[in-house]
Image (cartoon, rainbow, N blue to C red):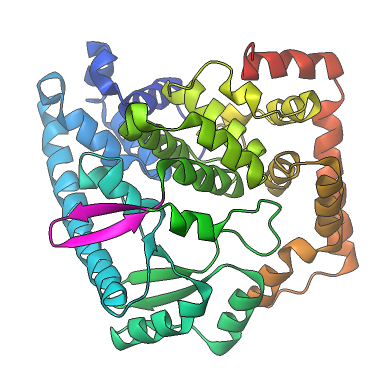
Amino acid sequence: MGTVTPDVTAVVLACSRRDGAAALPQDAFLRLGSPDYHQEFLAFANSHQLLGLALVELARHTGRLPSGIRDEHQPLLKQLRRQAVLWDFERDQVVSRLQNHGIPVVVLKGAALRVTAYRDPAERPFGDIDILVPKESLPDAVDLLEAQGYARHSEHRDRIYLEHFHHLVLSREPGFKVEVHWALVPSHSTIALDPEAFRRDAVPVTVPGSTFRVPAPEHMVIHLSAQNVEDGLALRRLVDLDRIIAAAGSGFDWSRLGSESRRMHAEGVTALSLRLAELLLGTVIPRGFIGQLGLPRTVRTHLAMLDPVAVTLGSRLERPAVKELLALWCTTGTAARWALLRDMATGRRERAWRALLHQPRGPLRRFVSLASLGGVQLVRYSAVLMGRRRARDFWGSE
């Protein structure tokens, strides 16, 4: 979306924090009574998939809201809660069917977070049910889902997903979708998320009528940090990280998060995502932890020069090159970064997507893309002293 009023950004961020909107001054609630301001607020929250979270938080302060706004929010919240009930029921049906046939399942991302990290189901929507199964169980899992009414897209699409990606997508009316993962990142990823460790260390969660397993909170943080960078930085992911850490409380193992991030070559995505959560949401991170992940000064400078706060809030025009630069500088090791740059230049990195979309990419387009990447790099990093100053401002004193 276009330029957003700073006040609107501040209100949505306040509603997204664990300490919530309680700290907002009364005039912030009163401004919501302005139709234009209110519509901008709803549009900005919805664009970041935080509408339910913001509405639930404001509902806790109904006495401070103009009456007309309260009346408008109530049907929206009712609709979001009704949708949540339908998706939760579908998740439980899918997982129970697979478990009853002996397939070990770990529920991932939004379908897991809703019941582990959030208080109200409307706070965390999800538009697909992500599950992780052993690769050898994949054919049986697909057969069981098809017997439940789900359908795959096509043999051509499945073949590309099996070769290049890490999940198969099945869907059924009236709009349910299941992503069956056997891995956690695509085959071309420079991050080595370990699905066996995710399955081995998963923890049980009990909801009315169902019990299933979800990743350990430390693994959830690593996975969502990787997703955050893959998305080009998303406020929704940062809120998830904040809630995971808060829900685990004193049981969150920071030492384990550090060692697993390094083992899975995820130091860059984890450090960047945690620092953004700390800056924007007040996430409590032990002093010195981000520094202990060991990002070289050059990497920290380059990431800071991308202005990640502005990218996350969507206040700067998104360019494809920014996503590629995020991936490049979150990659661990100089050799791996050179290999990734080569894949970007040759088009290997996006070959699978082009095959899915039937969009060949000739040498000229590859050259233009690489030139764009180099141009952004040159412009942003030409001022070395400014880069160091911005790095200090972003990363703090660690």
Q: Is residue 61 left or right of residue 160?
A: left
**Residue farthest toward the front in the current orientation of the protein:** 200
Magenta stretch prevailing secondary structure: strand
Q: Is residue 136 visible?
A: yes
Residue for point 71% across, 74% down: 359
Residue 298 against residue 159 in the figure, above or below: above
Magenta segment, which residues? 203-215
On screen, residue 294 above or below 91: above
Residue 178 falls left or right of residue 332? left
Q: Quadrant of the C terminus?
A: top right
Answer above or below: position of 124 versus 158.
above
Residue occupying the point 83% across, 31% down:
379
Q: Position of residue 41 (x, y in %)?
A: 34, 33
- Quarter of the rendering containing residue 188: bottom right
Residue toward you, 312 or 337: 337
Could you tell me if residue 312 is visible in this image? Answer: no
Would residue 285 appear left or right of 91 to someone viewing this image?
A: right
Viewer-nearest residue: 344 or 215:
215
Give x and y (percent) for residue 60.
15, 28
Residue 242 at x, y percent in the picture = 40, 32
Indicate left or right for 62 with 241 as reference: left
What count of labels does the image hold?
0
Residue at x 30% of width, y 80% of height: 101
Q: Is residue 344 magenta?
A: no
Looking at this view, is 343 or 53 the one in front? 343
- Splitting the image into 4 quarters, where does residue 151 fall? bottom left
Vertical placement of 185 versus 295: above or below?
Answer: below
